[in-house]
Image: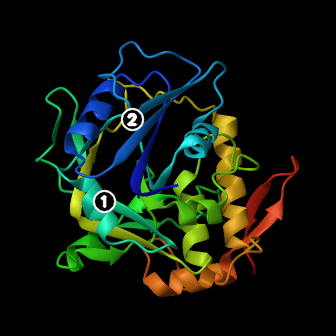
Amino acid sequence: MDKGKLSIIIPSRGEQFMPQTVNDIFAKAKGSIEVTVILDGAWPVAFPKDRPNLVYIHLGEAQGMRPAINSGASISHGEFLLKCDGHCLFAEGFDEVLRSEVEDNWIVVPRRYSLDPVTWTRNEDKAPVDAHYLSYPIAQDQTIYGLHGEVWRERAKQRADVLFDDEMSSQGSAWFMTRKHWDWLCGLHTEGYGTFIQEFQELGMKTWLGGGQVKVNKKTWYAHLHKGTRFPRGYPLSRSERDQGIRYSADFWMNNRWTGRVHDMSWLISKFAPVPSWPDNWEELFQLLPDESGGLVPGTTE
């Protein structure tokens, strides 16, 4: 392990803006870094400028984002890890700011802006995202919609002056931690989750319920491209795999199935209460029952 070095991991499958992302990282970082791009099942149309501390892993057969991230981390050498999507712009000196405030059992996310990929600038017409909450995983019509990191505008407004703050959850497009914490987390798992879905839910929930903390550092930022019709996803996901991962995650965390926890789900909800979408009697209401296919569906108590 190289003391002080930041290893940056970029999973990539057909990422149009991967070269811009890599070039931007090297232009903005001030300290010692290395960048590993995982080419998951495809070669890119273009490559960034070649550098001695830029490495590629080409997976001949696509494996998915979770295995790709694990592959990148497995060959990296840094004391710190930063994972980011292949369509991100960063602030000047982002790496030094992130290194300056982190503990061995923390995950830190920078403030997030929206990226304009054409001009390669952050979109100043949209407010930055500084806070997220975990959504209550059962909708009113009693169908699971999952534990998702939803933007929490009210909390961000109330705590605008808190530049380094607790963060209940996040999006997953960029996160930072020590290698020690990554090793403690044992990477990202595919059992139950599948190859893509619920990345930050696994990392964030393990961190909070395992005795660590998730933080947002508003002293630096990145800008992320929201994929849609104009810029399609590099990682397509079948509806069945998506639903299975969401169901698995909801069952696993809501029912406190992780044996490594030092806190239960009720502790996390109480810490951030009141949390949008969570009813006061959520513990009474929440119950998961097996369905005909062997999966899990929500039920209610009378």
Where disc 2 sits, the SS reads loop
For label 1, the crowd category at 10 Å Cα-Cα, with few meaning under 14, some 14 to 19 and many 20 or more, is many
Q: Position of residue 7 (x, y in %)?
A: 44, 48
Nearest the camera: 101 or 232?
A: 101
Q: Which residue is mark 2?
A: 53
Q: Position of residue 144 (x, y in %)?
A: 64, 57
Q: Amino acid at mark 2?
A: Asn
For label 2, the crowd category at 10 Å Cα-Cα, with few meaning under 14, some 14 to 19 and many 20 or more, is few
In the displayed structure, 111 sits above or below 61; it is below
Left or right relative to 298: residue 120 = left
Left or right relative to 206: residue 204 = left
Badge count: 2
In the displayed structure, 113 sits above or below 34; it is below
In the displayed structure, 198 sits above or below 15; it is below
Task: Kindly tell me whether residue 291 is visible in this rendering.
Answer: yes
Instruction: State the residue at coordinates (50%, 72%).
Output: 104
Q: Position of residue 127 (x, y in %)?
A: 18, 56
Instruction: State the residue at coordinates (22%, 74%).
Output: 163
Q: Which residue is mark 1?
A: 110
Left or right relative to 117: residue 250 = right
Of badges 2 and 1, nearer the viewer stands 2
Q: Amino acid at mark 1?
A: Pro
Which quarter of the picture shows residue 119? top left
Query: Which of the colour schemes (rainbow, by chain, secondary structure, one colour) is used?
Result: rainbow
**Quadrant assignment for the C terminus:** bottom right
Left or right relative to 113: residue 14 = right
In the displayed structure, 19 sits above or below 224; it is above
Whichever of labels 2 and 1 marks the residue nearer the N terminus, that label is 2
Nearest the camera: 214 or 134?
A: 214
Instruction: State the residue at coordinates (69%, 51%).
Output: 189
